[in-house]
Image: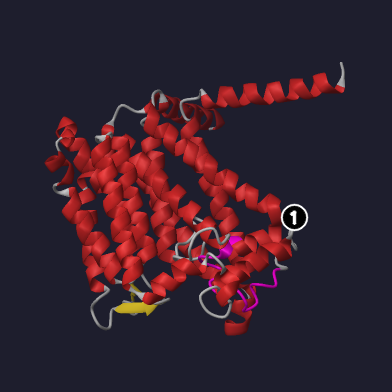
């Protein structure tokens, strides 16, 4: 057999194995679990690497920020496990309380003494403990679950524009309005894109969807032009080096990080941009440090994992007949994928710097809790795929038999 035949046999075997895996009832479940788990692991590694210099300078040891991130991850994982085993009827019953709670927490950021300004945005709450809370992150998940629940309950009535708008539009306007009032335009954009994703998957008339897109676009342009610093930030990405010391500083140094890493990277822990040069190197710009240290292979690995997560989420949405499952899966998948695209585009100076973290990878407790909880919801939705419940029941029965045999 020639070398070409051997290679063809290997590729054919790999394709057959992949096809067999995708035919399994729990394929989406394991794709979500595997891709999210690997992204979490990469995130922890890169948080330690990107903050080691800063932690040593500020606190005298390299693991200060890593330890805090690890605490958030360890707190989020049991929450995700609990949500993944929660019956969907309970999750749907809690959706209204989740939205009310999110609105209340967003409103508290405007209370003097509670609201904290960071990075020009008043989107943090300080209750006096060691950690700050960012309500807008939890609000994304709350909106997805509640909007999916409302539209699922309405059934065919959503074909009428008044049922499509009420009560979703006023509630979304309040949540987005509070977020914009905090000065957090990046999160507001993500929220509106999530809603557009759900509305598109719902199957509204094209003219109505076009009207919604136009309205969101017009609103975005208005808020960009309403503040000079926003306009400068948006236009700054076109040529970051034109105003290197001001609006182009982050984007320019992000480009330098990738250039310094080259094809293969400088090696884990060997970044030079993280040493007080690139701002937000552990949050919004952590992918730049990853690209500098791990090069093209590390960058592509993260992108492939997000693509696998997105494929699994879309697979869940497409294989179900349950409207709530379809809309919630599409909303969560759209959230992760759009936020990842915006973050990567921002880091690569393709998009303006709008300040959104890379899901499951960037440093941040509130973001970590919300995104890991969203993964738990998506795992619960994956169990609704055809044959998934039976496969899970069979797996549990096998475990019981092994335990009985062992005893």
Image quadrant in which you'd find residue 354 = bottom left
Above or below 233: residue 214 = above
Coloration mode: secondary structure
Q: Nearer the viewer, residue 79 or 239?
A: 239
**In what quadrant of the picture does the N terminus appear?**
top right
Is 43 left or right of 156, judged from the image as shown? right
Residue 369 lies within the magenta run? no
Above or below 49: residue 2 = above
Residue 12 location in percent, x, y?
69, 21
Magenta: main secondary structure equals loop
Q: Which residue is the extreme one toward the top?
A: 1
Residue 217 location in percent, x, y?
32, 55
Q: Secondary structure at mark 1?
A: loop
Above or below 73: residue 182 = below
Q: Which residue is found at the position 56% from the left and 26% from the top?
A: 21
Q: Nearer the viewer, residue 368 or 395?
A: 368
Magenta-colored span: 271-287
Can residue 85 be seen in this snapshot? Answer: no
Label 1 sits on residue? 263
Q: Nearer the viewer, residue 395 or 13?
A: 13
Total residue callouts: 1
Q: Which residue is found at the position 38% from the left and 73% from the top?
A: 132
């Amino acid at each position: 057999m020639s070398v070409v035949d051997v290679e063809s046999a290997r590729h054919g075997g790999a394709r057959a194995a992949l096809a067999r895996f995708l035919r399994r009832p729990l394929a989406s479940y394991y794709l979500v679990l595997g891709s999210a788990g690997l992204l979490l692991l990469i995130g922890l590694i890169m948080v330690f690497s990107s903050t080691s210099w800063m932690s040593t300078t500020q606190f005298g040891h390299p693991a200060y920020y890593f330890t805090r991130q690890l605490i958030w991850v360890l707190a989020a994982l049991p929450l995700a496990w609990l949500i993944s085993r929660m019956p969907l009827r309970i999750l749907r019953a809690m959706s209204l309380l989740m939205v009310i709670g999110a609105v209340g927490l967003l409103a508290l950021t405007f209370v003097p003494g509670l609201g904290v300004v960071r990075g020009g945005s008043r989107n943090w709450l300080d209750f006096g403990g060691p950690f700050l809370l960012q309500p807008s992150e939890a609000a994304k998940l709350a909106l997805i679950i509640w909007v999916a629940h409302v539209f699922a309950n309405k059934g065919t009535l959503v074909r009428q524009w008044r049922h499509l708008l009420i009560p979703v539009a006023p509630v979304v306007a309040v949540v987005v309005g509070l977020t914009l009032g905090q000065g957090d335009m990046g999160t507001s954009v993500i929220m509106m894109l999530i809603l557009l994703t759900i509305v598109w998957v719902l199957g509204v008339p094209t003219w109505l969807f076009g009207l919604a897109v136009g309205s969101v676009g017009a609103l975005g342009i208005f808020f960009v032009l309403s503040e000079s610093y926003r306009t400068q930030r948006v236009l700054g990405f076109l040529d970051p080096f034109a105003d290197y010391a001001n609006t182009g500083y982050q984007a320019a140094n992000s480009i330098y990080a990738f250039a310094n890493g080259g094809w293969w990277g400088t090696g884990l822990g060997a970044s030079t941009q993280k040493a007080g040069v690139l701002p937000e190197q552990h949050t919004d710009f952590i992918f730049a440090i990853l690209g500098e240290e791990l090069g093209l292979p590390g960058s592509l690995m993260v992108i492939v994992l997000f693509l696998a997560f997105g494929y699994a989420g879309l697979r869940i949405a497409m294989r179900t007949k349950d409207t709530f499952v379809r809309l919630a899966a599409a909303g969560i998948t759209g959230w992760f994928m759009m936020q990842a695209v915006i973050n990567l585009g921002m880091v690569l100076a393709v998009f303006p710097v709008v300040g959104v973290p890379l899901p499951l990878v960037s440093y941040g407790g509130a973001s970590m809790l919300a995104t890991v909880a969203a993964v738990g919801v998506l795992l619960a939705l994956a169990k609704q795929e055809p044959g998934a419940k039976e496969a899970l029941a069979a797996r549990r029965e096998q475990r019981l038999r092994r335990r009985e045999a062992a005893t």
